[in-house]
Image: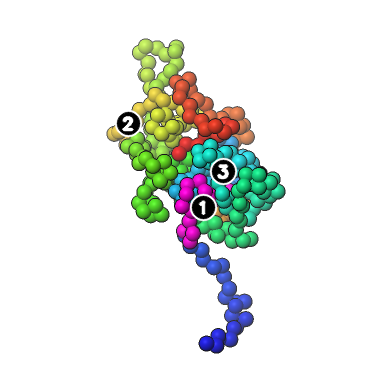
Amino acid sequence: MIAPPTCESCIQAKQAHRPFLKEAEHRAEIAGEQIVSNVWGPAHVKSIGGWLYYVSFLDDAKWLSTVLFLKRKSDAFQRIREYGAVIEWKFGKPPKYLRFDNSGELVNSEIEKWASEKGIKIETTAPYSPSQNGIVEQFNRTLLELTRAMLIGKQLPAFLWDKAVSHAVYLQNRAPTRALMGMTPLEAWSGTKPDVSHLWEFGCDVWILDEDKNRSKLALKSKKMIFTGFKNGPKAVHYYDTATWKIKVSRNFAFNENEEPRLKTSSNVPSLPAEEELAEVTITSHDDGPNPASDQTHKEETETQSSETWRLRTRDMDINY
């Protein structure tokens, strides 16, 4: 069969990016064997934890996702090493493959040397084609959509975006997915079906036991705070204290099952750009939130009643699946 003549003018006029499959044609079958990763940021608003970026990790076989936060994009390598240590601790060996976009902050001589020592093969996308890393790109897009919805739905300040992202990951790991034939990523990863009976809406009211020893015997025993996620599953909660502008943790909490939607007027609409909208931005502060220039002010405080701490054997990193 003789091929038709090629029209070079048509090629030059019409050529566009080739679409990529939403799911990889050849997925890994073993948990921890292949990890896809990407860095998102900078956010328009520095988070309450002092973060501007996050690096996401997605297990290609079980679709379990993890997000670690960054103050600078150049900190990504340290987070990648920490995540690699978690995989090595769990499975007794590091991942075989790490797939990134072709970014200098991620793929440089430092990470190549580390990967070579660990026996990890680095895979990168072609230049200007981040969609080749389609699985994690789609994950990030879904994650940001959930984050926006949670912040806007409760009219919460934008500097809580890091807590909303963490809670969105917590929910996604417990939600069934077609990629796993209706199984949840956490069940595929651990072999145990997750309990979701403890889930509550991000930003709802949560009552926290007042541990002040000087409290009057006739004073209220609980204070109403804003729920921002779980710690160690249902054992403890993160909450936002509007009086101190801090995120805290408590094991002594209660939800109001008859809660009505909280009406609150706020002009602080969350500023979370989509992946394709990222650009260099000026970090600004807000009158209704903490001063993001003070990292110490935004540091999470753990109350004395939070005696149970769950840490993996890697630096100071918490991974709350």
Q: Main secondary structure of the magenta part?
A: loop
Looking at this rendering, what residue extends furthest in the bottom direction? 2
Front tag of 3 and 1: 3
Q: Position of residue 28 (x, y in %)?
A: 49, 53
Q: Position of residue 79 (x, y in %)?
A: 59, 40
Residue 272 among magenta residues: no
Name which quarter of the figure residue 154 lies in.
top left
Can residue 136 be seen here? The reply is yes
Residue 305 shows which numbered tag?
A: none
Q: In percent of the image, x 61 and y 51: which residue is there?
A: 121
The residue carrying pointer 3 sits among few (fewer than 14), some (14 to 19) or many (20 or more) residues within 10 Å by Cα, namely: many
Which residue corresponds to mark 1? 136
Horizontal placement of 48 versus 186: left or right? right
Which residue corresponds to mark 2? 256
Residue 94 shows which numbered tag?
A: 3
Name which quarter of the figure residue 226 lies in.
top left
Front tag of 1 and 2: 1
The residue carrying pointer 2 sits among few (fewer than 14), some (14 to 19) or many (20 or more) residues within 10 Å by Cα, namely: few
The magenta span reads 23-39
Q: CA distance from mark 2 to mark 3?
A: 44 Å
Name which quarter of the figure residue 216 lies in.
top left
Upstream in the sequence, badge 1 or badge 2?
Answer: 1
Upstream in the sequence, badge 2 or badge 3?
Answer: 3
Report the quarter where the C terminus lies: top left
Name the element at disc 1.
helix
